[in-house]
Image (tube, rainbow, N blue to C red):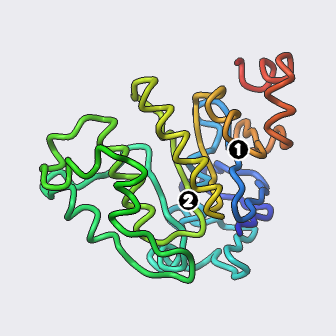
Amino acid sequence: MLRIDGIRTFYGETQALFDVSLQVAAGEVVALLGATGAGKTTTLRSILGLTPARQGTIHFDGRDVTHQSTHNIARSGVAWVPEERRVVPSLTVRRNLTIAQKHTRFKHWTLGDCCEIFTALEYLLERESENLSGGEMQMVAISRALLGSPGLVLMDEPSQGLAPKVVQDVMRTVQRLKKEGIGVLLVEQNVGAALDVADKVVVLDHGTVAYRGDAADLRANAPLRAQLLGA
């Protein structure tokens, strides 16, 4: 579904990514882990064309999207759940969601589907988004991504600032996406939660790939986990 080959990404003249490569298959969750500043969010921004890679290639669904515009990448079936959620505060929840609806070649999701996943969402639809809690905003952000009919979802720190119960709900949603055949690239500081839902893991260190392998192997290897992630 997603293949990144040797990308190098810069902010001005400062290089942030050094030959980063990874793959995400359909129905696979890949956890992208590492310390703050390791290059995780920059990797997501490179995929989306927000901070384009200067070298290397990015393929989605068999097509080279390295130099495509962000809106074309989104229309092809790549959805983003940003760390800041970016829910429009002046709009109702319903409006935040309906403006995100689009059709791609992937599964079409409806508002009803989202309310089935997040049962509380139905009761929030007419509320102004500025009055939502952090957990409610995250429900809206994930639902907004699904309504774009994605084949790939990029999730940036989805558990940040959330209560443990809400974190469990978010991670159950990640597992649901996997069952639906959607690929997920999951950036997450909660290492335990990420490894519990991921199939594969890639660890970045100062913009380079320090480790890649099966999530189960890293979960079972406490010394290696401590060495790579301090967790």
Q: Quadrant of the C terminus?
A: top right
Query: Residue 78 appears in which quarter of the rendering?
Result: bottom right
Q: Is 40 in front, or is 152?
A: 152
Query: Residue 216 appears in which quarter of the rendering?
Result: top right
| Residue 175 image offset from top left, x and y in percent | 61, 47
Establish if 192 lies above or below 89. above
Establish if 70 lies above or below 113. below
Q: Work out whether mark 1 precedes mark 2 in sequence or the reverse, and give the earlier one.
A: 2
Q: Is 12 in front, or is 106?
A: 106
Q: Quadrant of the N terminus?
A: bottom right
Amino acid at dot 2: Val
Q: Is 206 in front, or is 171?
A: 171
Pointer 2 local density, CA inside 10 Å: few below 14, some 14–19, many at least 20: many
Q: Classify mark 2: helix, strand or loop.
A: strand
Mark-to-mark CA distance, 1 and 2: 21 Å
Determine whether label 1 and label 2 are within 8 Å by CB: no
| Residue 30 image offset from top left, x and y in percent | 71, 49
Query: What residue is shown at x 64% (from left), y 35% (from top)?
Result: 194
| Residue 224 image offset from top left, x and y in percent | 85, 22
- Residue ID for mark 1: 207
Query: What residue is shown at x 59% (from left), y 69% (from top)?
Result: 151
Q: Is 195 in front, or is 108?
A: 108
Amino acid at dot 1: Gly
Establish if 228 lies above or below 151. above
Tag shown at residue 146:
none
Pointer 1 local density, CA inside 10 Å: few below 14, some 14–19, many at least 20: many
Query: What residue is shown at x 69% (from left), y 80% (from top)?
Result: 64
Judged left or right of residue 220, residue 136 is left
- Residue ID for mark 2: 153
Q: Classify mark 1: helix, strand or loop.
A: loop
Establish if 104 lies above or below 217. below
Query: What residue is shown at x 82% (from left), y 18% (from top)?
Result: 222
